[in-house]
Amino acid sequence: MAEETLHKQFPPYTPKKGEEYMNPKQLAHFKMILESLKAELLDDIEKTVHTMQDEATVFADPNDRASQESDIALELRNRDRERKLIKKIDESLARIESGEYGYCEACGVEIGIKRLEARPTATLCIDCKEIEERREKQMAK
């Protein structure tokens, strides 16, 4: 399950005029989103494990067996991506506790409420992220 579809059940946080950035109310909002994301991901992983155990069948037909192995490989890739997302969520929760959440790791400026609503695990402001993506693109050529 993609990160962006998991936390849409929460209404976006609308800061009031003059409200301090990353005040306790905002931090609580994002902490709730991150904890909910983590719980849903862990639940999905648990369901996958049980499903894979229940559906572990040995097919005599090589085509059926290949199809099952392909399905399992795809499922395991998805679970690996979710495991990595859980790690990012844990890091974001730790940043909330340390008072660093919402600020760019590279330059220290505010990441922004709207960006965090779209990607609660963001650690870079949009400018630093664009620079990083340009570097990655140049290195890939």
Image: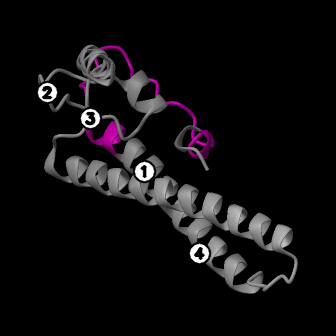
Residue 137, disc: none
Question: Along the polypeptide, which appears first: circle 1 or circle 2?
Answer: 1
Dot 2 corresponds to which residue?
A: 106
Dot 4 corresponds to which residue?
A: 46
User: Are the two marked residues, 1 and 3, in contact with CB atoms closer than 8 angstroms?
Assistant: no
- Distance from Cα at disc 4 to Cα at disc 3: 28 Å
At 20% from the left and 30% from the top, the residue drawn is: 103
Q: Main secondary structure of the magenta part?
A: loop
Q: What percent of the width, then of the height, locates residue 122?
A: 33, 34
Binning the other alpha carbons within 10 Å of mark 1 as few (below 14), some (14 to 19) or many (20 upward) gives many
Q: Secondary structure beneath disc 3?
A: loop
Question: Which portion, as a residue range, is magenta?
Answer: 5-27
Dot 1 corresponds to which residue?
A: 34
At 42% from the left and 52% from the top, the residue drawn is: 85
Q: Residue 21 versus residue 82: which sits nearer the camera?
A: 82
- Distance from Cα at disc 3 to Cα at disc 2: 8 Å
Does residue 86 belong to the magenta stretch?
no
- Distance from Cα at disc 4 to Cα at disc 1: 18 Å
Q: What percent of the width, then of the height, locates residue 112?
A: 32, 22
Amino acid on which the number 4 mark rests in the picture = Glu
Question: Along the polypeptide, which appears first: circle 4 or circle 1?
Answer: 1
Binning the other alpha carbons within 10 Å of mark 3 as few (below 14), some (14 to 19) or many (20 upward) gives many
Residue 45's place in the image compared with 77, above or below, is: below
Q: Secondary structure beneath disc 4?
A: helix
Amino acid on which the number 2 mark rests in the picture = Ala
Q: What percent of the width, then of the height, locates residue 83?
A: 44, 60
Dot 3 corresponds to which residue?
A: 123
At 26% from the left and 52% from the top, the residue drawn is: 91
